[in-house]
Every structure is written in C-alpha cells, then in structure tokens.
Amino acid sequence: MSQNKMKVDIQSFIDANPLSSLQKSIMWLCFVIVAIDGFDTAAIGFIAPALKAEWALKATDLAPLFGSGLFGLMAGALIFGPLADKLGRKPILLGSVIVFSLATVFSAFSPDLHTLIILRFITGLGLGGAMPNAITLTAEYAPTSRRSNLVTMMFCGFTIGSAFGGILSAQLLPHIGWHGILLTGGILPLLLVPFLMYFLPESIRFLVLKKKATDKIEKIAARIAPAQTAIPTLIPTVNEVEKSSLKDLFAKGYALGTVLIWFTFFMSLLIIYMISSWMPTLLTNAGFNLSNASWLTSIFQVGGTIGAIVLGFLMDKQDATKILSAAYILGGLCLVGLGMGIQQANTLLLMLAMFGVGVGISGSQVGANAFASGFYPTHCRATGVSWSNAVGRSGSVIGSVVGGWLMSLNLSSLEIMSLLAIPAVLAAISLLLIQRLKKEQTQTVSELS
C-alpha cells in the first residue's frame, strides 16, 4: 500500500542533519580540484624566468603567455557555468578537469612560445569550468549556517596549491626543467578523474530542482541523513525555478548586486594575478634569488589560507560584506608595506606585509566566492558564480598585462604596490554598497508586509 511522504524543502533537509561523510568527501574532492588550479597558477609564474632564458624573451613577451591562460579561464567560466545549470555540475566538472589536464600535459612539449600560448588558453578553458562548479557543488551540499566557512575552507585548496606549486617549482626547476613542472601539473589531475567519476555525486539540489530520477535523489539523501529511517519527499527551495538563463542574474533584487559582485571580483583578481604572475620576477630583479622568491611568495598563499578560514568563520557570524570590506582595506595597507619591504630589502617587513596581503586580498577573494554562492538561488547559482569569476578573470588578464607594463616603465616597487592598493580600496567600497543595498531591500520588504 502506497503511503504519502512528508514534503521537505531540500535546504531545510540539509540544514536539519549533521554534516555527513558524503558531504565531507565532496568538499575534499573539490578542495583537490581547486588546489590543482592553484598549483597551475603559481607554477606558470615560476617557470616564466626559465622560459625567458631558454627562448631569449623580454619580460613583455611573457604577458601574452599569462594573458592567454587567463582569457581561457574567462571563456571557460562564461561557457561552462550556464551549461552546468542546464546539464548538471558533475559532468561539466569532470569534462573541465580532463580538458585542463590533457592541455597541461601537451604544454610540456611546446616547441615555442606561440604553441605554449595556444595550449595555455585551452588549459584555461578547463580550469575556468572547474573552479566555479567546485564552489557551486560545495555550496549546494553545505548547511546554511556553515556555508561560508565550508566554502572558504574548500577554496583554501587554491591558496595551498599555489603555495605548494611555487615552492615545488622553484626547488624542482633546476632538476626537471619547466617541461617537468608542466608534466607534473597535467598528470596529477588525470589521476584524480577516476575518483571524481566514482565518488563525486551530482548536486542533490540540482536533481530536485530538475525533477530527476527519484531513486537517485533518495539514494543521495539517505547518505546525507544515514540515521533517518524514512526519507521525505524533497522539494525545491521557495522561489526557485527549473529553467535558468543569464538574465536571471539581473532579475529584480539581483541586478545591482550582480554588478557590484562582478566589480569586486574584477578588482580582487587583478591584484592576485599581478602578484602571482610578476612577484617572482619583481623579487629576482630586486636581488632575491629564485628559491628565496618562492618562499616569500608562498607566504602570500599561507596568509590567504589562514585569512580565508578566519574570514569564512566570521562571515557566518557577522555581516559578510562588512567583514570582507575591512579585510580588503587591510590588504591595501599591506600592499604599500610590501612595496616598502622590497625597496628597502627589509626581509621582516616583506614577510609581514606579504602575509597581510594574503589575508586581506587572497583571503577576501575566497570569501567573495562564498558570498556569491550564497547570493544566488540554485537555478542560476553556477551561472552566477562562474560569471562573477569570468568577469574577475578579465581583471586578472589586465593585472598580468599591466604588471609587465609597469615594470617596463621602471617604476619602483613601492610605486607599483601603491598603485595596486587602489583596486583593494575600490573592492571594499563595492562590498559596502552591496550591504547598503541589502539593508534597503530588507526595509522595503518589512514595509510591504
């Protein structure tokens, strides 16, 4: 005899149960995916001096190499985010990992700069699809009260991967060359693919929203709540629709917030990628050897990791926009200190400032990803997060190109870093405007009710 099951909102179901082993494994797998992205980002910056020497290049010749990968990241995010909202998070995530893995392997055998530039673009396409979907999948399995903390902890994979990539590249470069560094960066994610295929489930929120096979939904739900004997019928969260499009990001209540989030990502990633791409070169030009430059740059990633964890915790307790705004201001001040440290060859100041920039800028960018994942509903979440990253990547393209241009002007390190502090302040202002917008919307709702 059939029995009517109780209907429960999917987010309420996730919120009502303790974090399961399934949810933890999803977050660990997504952590590894973004760590590989971080490794790739740092490695290309550290092999740049080797490429420059082997192919007799000028510093400005490297700008298209950095830019091509970032253009690929931007294009990948623009294309694969909306596709993930239509086809699902898992297939897009798997496909993206396979694309960037194979492209990185082929990059190791590049005969010249032009070939490497093309292959870096293809690598970027895959990375651009992987990162936003890892964020989205983590957010959709996270309880509301811990979403910011869990997403930022997962995304710490990027900063840890960047630190590891920088240190490993600097230490192994004399032994295996830039070819070996790229080969390592391509083979590692390929080894991850079978684990993703077997252990990574589709987003249960996506399956519920798209009314997919009930048995598949119940199987995942049973793993989220293993103590429950009867799994209820799960329904989409209120106000979420099955079909999505880019225009949903500009629907009532989201349009201005979307523009401000994009602006924040643009400014934030401009700083991060300029530092990631050019800091090893800036430090070696100032007289630091490549090994010391790798350790100093890795402090930036350590600061980013610690900053992300602390900011994620605070964002779940306080207003997220105020927390992130304060962190960006801190990062801007530390950028000025970083310029002074390089100019004066003051190692202690350099280390403290580099750590502060990591906390304030890299940590805030991780927090901004968590903020964006909570800002949008399920039906357009992957599109919202990926397009925020895509617009941000345009900032990273500009950052990587402007870095070379500023260095060609023979500006001092203090002048370069002081100019770089301006985008940090603008990102802080943008977030405060989002906070004001949210307050006005809350007042409007309360007046109407």
Image: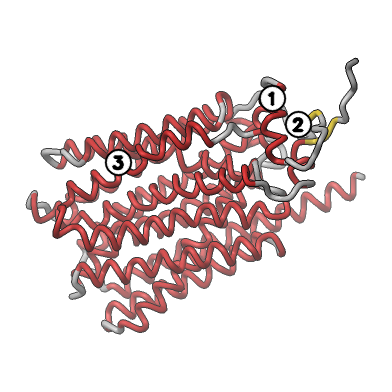
* Front residue of 232 and 294: 232
Assign a secondary structure to mark 1. loop
Asked if disc 2 and disc 3 are in contact, CB closer than 8 Å, the reply is no
Residue 8 figure quarter? top right
Tell me what residue is drawn at x 30 percent, y 41 percent. 187
Q: Report whether 16 appears left or right of 4.
A: left
* Front residue of 59 and 216: 216
Work out how far the residue at label 3 is from the one at label 1, CA to CA, in angstroms.
37 Å
| Residue 242 tag number | 1
Tell me what residue is drawn at x 18 percent, y 75 percent. 287
* Front residue of 370 and 423: 370
Q: Position of residue 281 (x, y in %)?
A: 22, 64
Q: Position of residue 373 (x, y in %)?
A: 61, 45
Work out how far the residue at label 2 is from the one at label 1, CA to CA, in angstroms.
9 Å
Residue 320 can be seen in this image: yes
Numbered circles on residues, count: 3
Asked if disc 2 and disc 1 are in contact, CB closer than 8 Å, the reply is yes
Residue on which the image places disc 2: 236
Residue on which the image places disc 3: 187
Q: Position of residue 271 (x, y in %)?
A: 40, 60
Sequence order check, earlier mark of 3 and 1 = 3
The crowding category of the residue bearing disc 2, from other C-alpha atoms within 10 Å (few below 14, some 14 to 19, many at least 20), is: many
The crowding category of the residue bearing disc 3, from other C-alpha atoms within 10 Å (few below 14, some 14 to 19, many at least 20), is: some
Sequence order check, earlier mark of 2 and 3 = 3
